[in-house]
Image (cartoon, grey):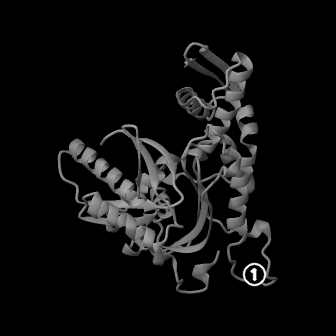
Amino acid sequence: MEQCNFTRQLRSGSLELHQAHQAQAFSPQYVAGTLISELKHMTEARLGREIEYAVLTVPRHVTYAGRQSLRYAGMVLGGFRSVKVVDEQIAAAAAHGRHLQPGDGKVVLVFHVGGRTTHATIFKFINGMPWYINSHDNLFFGGNNLSLSFSCFNCDDFTERLVHHLVELVKQQHGTDIRHDKAALLRLRAECERAKKTLSDQQETIVQVESLVDGSVDLFTAPLTRAKFEELNSDLFERAIHLLDRTVMNAPVVDDHDGAAESSRNKALIDEIVLVGGSSKIPMIRELVKDYFHGRDANPNPNPNGGLELVQPDEAVIHGALLLTRPEAAGYLEECYHPWSWGPPKTATDASL
């Protein structure tokens, strides 16, 4: 695969790539197919055998046409014999073993907090099949506040807040404005990503970039605390919890005689809380979710052999997709793959908390 520099997303929905000093537009389907094909070849080289089948995961809001387009990309362009598409939320629940108690009708909340998008979905597993209750998503988590000249498409919003903050520090300390210096921003962004992850385990760290700007900034260093990171991203945390609250509070409730469920009632009816997505590792996110549910922690994965086996939030969807490559062995029904398995429900109870 030839190396390309991604430039921007066009209004038509196509992606513009720069290659050999030329710009060319490609459809999302073509880009997806090319990436899938490359991943297929890499995996086959690693395993030493051909791979014919694949499970691809998508957010729940992807339409039937979008899923069919992705299947086409995986089969015709990617080279797979058969491709199945499953919702990310179902895959995440699978990774956490939420199907291991069939027929009990437990209500599962999957809260995904990524770098650019966030979504929350509530459903039940009834006899191995997920039944949709409610869902909300935010596809542009950072909104327009990050539409800065040095922002990059598909970059982590939390990281971009650090970049913005440190760009100002560079200007204050060295008198150099690097907002339009792509090379300097690339180095700074990589260090900000490292610092963000470090702050999930530590209270403070040092941001350090050597040769940030040739000839003017040989070494840039700045202390960074978790408290400062949380301050820079406070509005993003609020947006995430607001979306979670909308999902929980707008879910239909059985036997709601007065027509308006109390907040504590809806929260109490959530049996399992599953946090996924790389940004769900951020301590403030986990603390806010715990506070929202009155001290309840997100549940780890129950190990069938006893004890607890933790699934990393940014790997949950991958683990679940692996389980769903053999749904019968994993205890899932074939309907888990189809968007229409989310409804219509068998009874009114199936469609509510």
Residue under pointer 1: 256
Residue extending farthest right: 258
* Residue for point 63% across, 78% down: 352
Q: Is residue 249 left or right of residue 188?
A: right
**Residue 87 higher or lower than 236, as above or below:** below
Q: Amino acid at mark 1?
A: Asp
Q: Secondary structure at mark 1?
A: loop
137 over 240 or under it: above or below: below
Residue placed at 52% from the left, 86% from the top?
A: 346
Residue 245 at x, y percent in the picture: 72, 62
Q: Position of residue 135 (x, y in %)?
A: 61, 68
Tell me the crowding category of disc 1: few under 14, some 14 to 19, or many 20 or more residues within 10 angstroms, Cα based. few
Picture coordinates of residue 241, whole percent (x, y):
71, 55
Quarter of the image where the N terminus is located: top left
Residue 110 position within the rendered picture, expressed as x and y whole percent measured from the top left: 57, 60
**The C terminus: image quadrant:** bottom right
- Name the residue: 60% across, 47% down: 280
Residue at x 64% of width, y 39% of height: 149
- Quarter of the view holding residue 193: top right
Q: Is residue 153 left or right of residue 269?
A: left
Q: Relative to 147, does residue 138 appear above or below in the rendering? A: below
Residue 47 quadrant? top left
Pick the residue in front: 187 or 43.
Answer: 187
Residue sticking out furthest to the front: 22
Name the quadrant containing residue 100: bottom left
Q: Is residue 233 left or right of residue 25?
A: right
In the image, 44 versus 276, the foreground residue is: 44
